[in-house]
């Protein structure tokens, strides 16, 4: 059996003669946040083709993507795995949410300006 010197940070999956099988650590939350960000942005780009019905799908996906990306980012600080994926998910999901909420706030601001001038 081979001798392991030092600390093994990976999970040992199995041991065979003269070979140790090791599973690399992953960050599932960061991956999920990035995938939700990509899917959410894809739905937003395709929304004019579906009469903007995809917005009802892309906004909840972006919201959950922000949550998963924040969890993945905090996990990446501890484990060192998935930092880039978490940051990509944060950028895509927050950008998606801002693209929806900025026009809503602008419309509400115009409405408040019109009612306050009466």
Image (cartoon, grey):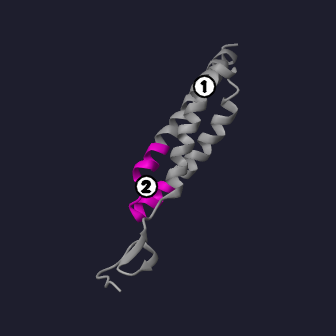
Cα distance, mark 1 to mark 2?
A: 28 Å
Can residue 42 be seen here?
Answer: yes
Q: Which mark is residue 98?
A: none
Assign the magenta stretch its main secondary structure.
helix
Query: What residue did someone put label 2 on?
Result: 82
Q: Is residue 70 above or below residue 41?
A: below
Instruction: Kindly identify the residue that appears in the image at 43 percent across and 46 percent down.
Output: 87
Q: Which residue occupies 61% across, 43% down?
A: 63
Check disc 2: other Cα within 10 Å, few if <14, some if 14-19, many if 20+: many
Q: Residue furthest top?
A: 118
Is residue 71 something one can see in this rendering?
Answer: no
Q: Name above or below for residue 1 compared with residue 115.
A: below
Percent coordinates x, y for residue 17 in the rendering: 39, 81
Outermost residue toward the front in this view: 17
| Among numbered discs 1 and 2, the one appearing first in the sequence | 1
Tell me the quarter of the picture where residue 62 sits. Answer: top right
Give the x, y percent position of residue 3.
Answer: 31, 85
Is residue 80 left or right of 55 when viewed as pictured? Answer: left
Which of 64 and 21 lies nearest the eye of the viewer? 21
Which residue is at 42% across, 72% downward?
Answer: 21
| Stretch of the chain drawn in magenta | 72-89
Of 96 and 10, which appears nearest the observer?
Answer: 10
Q: Residues within 10 Å of mark 1 (few under 14, many from 20)?
A: some
Q: Is residue 113 magenta?
A: no
- The residue beneath circle 1 is 46
């Amino acid at each position: 059996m081979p001798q392991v010197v030092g600390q093994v940070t990976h999970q040992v999956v199995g041991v065979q003669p003269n070979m140790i099988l090791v599973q690399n650590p992953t960050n599932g939350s960061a991956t999920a946040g990035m995938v939700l960000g990509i899917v959410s942005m894809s739905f937003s780009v395709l929304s004019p083709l579906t009469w903007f019905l995809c917005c009802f799908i892309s906004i909840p996906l972006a919201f959950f993507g922000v949550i998963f990306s924040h969890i993945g980012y905090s996990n990446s600080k501890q484990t060192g795995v998935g930092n880039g994926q978490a940051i990509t998910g944060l950028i895509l999901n927050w950008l998606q949410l801002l693209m929806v909420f900025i026009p809503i706030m602008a419309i509400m601001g115009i409405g408040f300006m019109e009612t306050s001038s009466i």
